[in-house]
Image (cartoon, coloured by chain):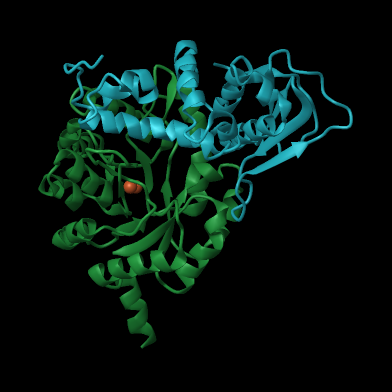
Chain colours: A green, B cyan
């Protein structure tokens, strides 16, 4: 399992360099549409490591085709230069009746499958690339239908799933989606996310995917129980941290992940060669 | 009035309430739906007051004397809650009982203009590089630039032009820049709702 860190804006540049230099991480995941005004060549020279691309605001379930075509044209420039290990996006609602959510919405898996499937097919075709779609940290009970939805989506569109393990932990805590229900999705997926969550301020408590705290014991237990389902050749796991970014805390979590998954194969190979 | 029969199986059932304190009050407080809506509403609150904390001087510490009536007004007007969110808060304050105190100190205006410029620079996914925001209450301009280098974030500039631009026809106006230079004035665009 290769470990990575999410790079969303310039202020963590030096820290990500240090994480790489000290070999706490093996690759870097760009929140790519934050960098659409940065020259692709500059971006490709920013870090000397493999790259994953994560799209935040394509809004491909809502945007019209010309907007998506233009977005994809710019995305393509980065894909061509960076040659990423994967391109990922989100199955999310950004607006309701034209008004923006500030805490993004989850779709209704049972009634929206067909329309999402068609959008996924169109979006992959426009980008000219297989895309990996991330699961949502469900709160409401409709989240129990997510595993079957993603399984079917993969089968019928050829899309991948970027499986966020801590999002699945939130969903498990909030609406009881069993980890076991994700087994086939995890087995199929090669790209993963993991992060900390916290509880809501008011009761009945729900778990929120905040990317601001340490990995929780139940997240680590989930990874341990499914270790062999997660780990596979070419697998990647991005540790996401967007708030309270403390180097030592991040390294402590990355070390836990290393202990769990061991050194990635590529690295063992390097070591064998230099020994 | 609390209605026990409100559907709340999926997140989608709650969409209208996610931006409405009034609708949130219709859900029983001991249920998950209430908390989920509360989480969403807190995002609107924090997006406003974490970025423009001066506004709490007007409202008092919990911000509710601004937040609740503003959200209700925004609901009536069906505001899109795009990058111009903060500018609409100012527009609401300007016709509220807070008007006099608001206009007595230009720090409030500077804060909301900078906040909206920054939000545009973070969230806009069009091809433009920058945005210029102007206001009828000041000749100063605020510019937001998108991230242009891997080591930088977005950048916000306050400009006091020697020769002021004509005032925008509404309270606020804006125009966008196709390069990282402010070299022409194409005229003001009005805020979309
Ligand atoms: Fe997450
Ligand atoms: Fe994630």
Q: Is residue A253 left or right of residue B55?
A: left
Q: Is residue B112 above or below residue A82?
A: above
Instruction: Say whether residue A27 is visible.
Output: yes
Position of the C terminus of chain B by quadrant: top right
Furthest toward the bottom, the residue is A275
Tell me where residue A89 sits by quadrant: top left
Name the residue at 61% across, 25% down: B87
Q: Position of residue A163 (x, y in %)?
A: 27, 48
Name the residue at 74% across, 22% down: B137
Tell me where residue B16 sits by quadrant: top left
Q: Is residue B154 left or right of residue B71?
A: right
Q: Position of residue B122 (x, y in %)?
A: 55, 39
Name the residue at 43% across, 18% down: A98
Furthest toward the right, the residue is B162
Furthest toward the front, the residue is B60
Residue placed most toward the observer, A229 or A44: A229
Residue placed most toward the observer, B52 or B121: B52
């Amino acid at each position: 399992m290769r470990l990575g860190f999410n790079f969303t804006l310039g202020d963590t540049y030096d820290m990500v360099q240090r994480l790489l230099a000290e070999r706490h991480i093996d690759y870097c995941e760009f929140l790519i549409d934050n960098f659409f005004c940065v020259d692709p060549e500059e971006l490709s020279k920013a870090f000397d490591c493999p790259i994953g691309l994560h799209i935040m605001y394509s809004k491909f379930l809502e945007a019209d085709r010309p907007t998506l075509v233009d977005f994809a044209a710019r995305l393509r420039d980065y894909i061509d230069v960076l040659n990423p290990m994967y391109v990922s996006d989100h199955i999310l609602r950004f607006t309701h009746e034209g008004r923006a959510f500030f805490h993004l919405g989850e779709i209704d898996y049972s009634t929206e499958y067909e329309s999402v499937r068609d959008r996924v097919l169109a979006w992959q075709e426009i980008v000219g690339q297989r895309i990996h779609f991330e699961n949502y940290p469900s709160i409401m009970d409709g989240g129990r239908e997510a595993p079957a939805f993603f399984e079917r989506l993969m089968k019928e569109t050829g899309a991948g799933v970027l499986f966020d393990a801590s999002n699945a932990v939130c969903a498990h805590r909030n609406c009881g989606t069993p980890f076991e229900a994700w087994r086939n999705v995890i087995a199929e997926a090669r790209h993963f996310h993991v992060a900390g969550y916290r509880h809501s301020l008011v009761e009945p408590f729900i778990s929120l995917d905040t990317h601001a705290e340490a990995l929780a014991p139940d997240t680590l237990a989930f990874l341990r129980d499914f270790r062999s389902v997660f780990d596979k050749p070419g697998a990647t796991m991005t540790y996401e941290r967007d708030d309270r970014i403390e180097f030592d805390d991040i390294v402590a979590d990355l070390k836990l992940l290393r202990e769990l998954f061991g050194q990635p194969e590529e690295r063992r190979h390097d070591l064998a060669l230099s020994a | 009035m609390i209605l026990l029969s409100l559907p709340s199986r999926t997140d989608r059932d709650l969409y209208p309430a996610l931006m409405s304190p009034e609708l949130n009050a219709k859900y029983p407080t001991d249920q998950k739906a209430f908390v989920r809506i509360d989480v969403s509403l807190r995002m609107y609150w924090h997006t406003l007051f974490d970025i423009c904390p001066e506004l709490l001087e007007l409202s008092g510490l919990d911000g509710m004397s601004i937040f609740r009536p503003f959200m209700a007004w925004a609901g009536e007007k069906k505001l899109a809650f795009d990058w111009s969110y903060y500018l609409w808060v100012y527009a609401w304050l300007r016709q509220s009982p807070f008007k006099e105190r608001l206009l007595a100190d230009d720090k409030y205006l500077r804060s909301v203009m900078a906040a909206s410029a920054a939000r545009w620079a973070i969230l806009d996914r069009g091809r433009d590089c920058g945005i210029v925001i102007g206001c009828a209450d000041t000749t100063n301009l605020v510019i937001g630039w998108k991230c242009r280098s891997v080591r930088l974030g977005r950048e916000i500039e306050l400009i006091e032009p020697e020769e002021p631009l004509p005032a925008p026809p509404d309270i606020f106006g804006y125009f966008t820049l196709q390069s990282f230079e402010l070299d022409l004035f194409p005229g003001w665009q009005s805020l979309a709702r």
